[in-house]
Image (tube, helix red, strand yellow):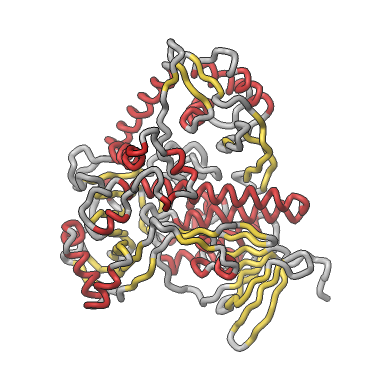
Amino acid sequence: MLDSSKPKPIGIIGGGPAGSIAALCLRKLNRDAEVFEKSKFPRYRIGESLLPGTLSILSRLGLADQLETVGFSKKRAATFIWGPNHEPWTFSFATPKTRSWTYDHAYQVERAEFDQLLLNAARERGATIHEDCEVTHVSTDNGKGGGRISWRKGTEVGTTDAPWIIDGSGRRGLIATSTGSRQFDPYFKNMAIWSYFKGGKRYSGNLKGNIFSVATNYGWIWIIPLRNDTYSVGVVTDESVNERIRETDLVTVFEEMLTTCDFTRDLLKNAERCDKIRATRDWAYEASVYATEKAFLCGDAACFIDPLFSQGVHLAAFSAVLASACIDHLIDNPEASSKVQQWYDQSYREAYNGYHEFLTAFYACNSGRPSNFWKRRAIFDEKDSRFEDKAWFASSKSLDAADTAAEIARRGMALGELWRHASGQLSDDFDEMELSLRRLRWAGDRMKQFQQMKSVRWTSPHVRLASTFKVDPLSFKLEETACLEDGAGRCFRNFPANENHRQLFESSRSQRFSFRELSRELRKAGADGLPTQITGELLEQGFLTGYDSNDQPISVENPLRFRGVGATDPLA
């Protein structure tokens, strides 16, 4: 006999990484999940390059051994041929293993196999999976305190009620598009053309397995080394190339773009294309609301941005964990709905906007190239309307308006200098140790700057504790906590704070603490994290101000930070 008292499963739209990881998280949290997937797996998807942070999440979901067994190509870094001098830069994932789930590598995956692995794991853990089942409509209010999913499977149609819904429907974005809340980004208005090649040159040593991203006059090219001597190769270019495609054809345009690039011409000299050429609009967008009534939007259903740094699957995994933790909490604490959904929206949007800032700065590094693509990606001035809703852009504005664009490009170039190959050339002799030593010197110089501060004070007149949440990194349970707030609505959510921390920073406004002394007091107050790192980030973000022996403020640069690598992610 059917147990009508048993809670209905959480409804999940889409069986891709966002939907499958959400189902896995909900099962870990002992909640039932029901997935509605339009396709029959395995099915093709682009987006083969992952980040270490995604492996970190999957490891804690018990999938590390399965991923290792498959034998996907290991990715230890991303290499760029970039910047005004077109030099090689390598962004290494090397990092201290501070926790068992901290990874110094990722994988280059075939998405059909990777996505099937995730969906099968969700099924094995007890989630109900419906494949070949298209969701035709979503209601976030079924009149019974939940949502309703309308679906079609072959000739059969039906509806399923769910207490909560996770929209992981990818770029289709069922909820965002049906409610008109999707907003396209006017800066990242690109298109992508890609295919696959067998054979070709392979790099060895510290470049083995790296994704390559190469700037060209018409945009940039990705080259991803997959298993079985296969490369995924694609071009990100301007939408205006459609006119050229209409004049000739897609094959001609794609081949022209590859052969006019010295790097790809050399790499693919002995390779043969082994698949058809595909194209899509690669436009960035985000929903105006990431959580609404009884639904959470995850992965591409909520937002999408240019794939230069391979962050798409990580955003899907990150948001899936957050949404699952929120729903688990709200089942037991329904009165907290507004507060929890607001936290989810802020947390996911903050992650998206962090990538937006990072990618814009890297695009700006090439804004001097004489082509329409890069001219359109130049930042005009401090009033550039394409960034009017971006808080990071407002904080980048210089007192001298003419320097705003240059400052954003300079921040990208500063990271490029840390990653630049000493020889200025790309070869198998490259040793990533040179990057590690350069980063150590940079960190040492920065610490010297901090230690020169004779006093460090809280910047604003107010130091408050604001209620917030965090996800426990092992249980994935949502927990109530607090963070520091400056009285003007700015919160520092990078580490949980308590009344001892608040009183310490309040006293810094009148009591003289050096950087070292403040960090030491923070340790005594029981900081959850490395005190010097916390103090440093508060300085970088302007919550604290350091002063020299003449009581003059010391300017501290806020460097670009990239989520999904090392132990800096909120879920690390």
Decide if residue 120 is in sight here.
no
Residue 244 picture quarter: bottom left
| Residue sitting farthest toward the top | 549
Q: Residue at x 16, y 57 (%)?
A: 262
Q: Position of residue 390 (x, y in %)?
A: 48, 47
Q: Residue at x 55, y 37 (%)?
A: 494
Q: Residue at x 32, y 53 (%)?
A: 377
On screen, 245 above or below 260?
A: below
Q: Position of residue 153 (x, y in %)?
A: 60, 82
| Residue sitting farthest toward the bottom | 155
Front residue of 296/178: it is: 178
Is 489 left, or right, of 237 in this rendering? Answer: right
Decide if residue 352 is in sight here.
yes
Is 387 left, or right, of 132 in this rendering? Answer: left
Residue 254 picture quarter: bottom left
Front residue of 257/376: it is: 376
Q: Position of residue 189 (x, y in %)?
A: 38, 61
Front residue of 330/99: it is: 330
Q: Residue at x 64, y 56 (%)?
A: 324
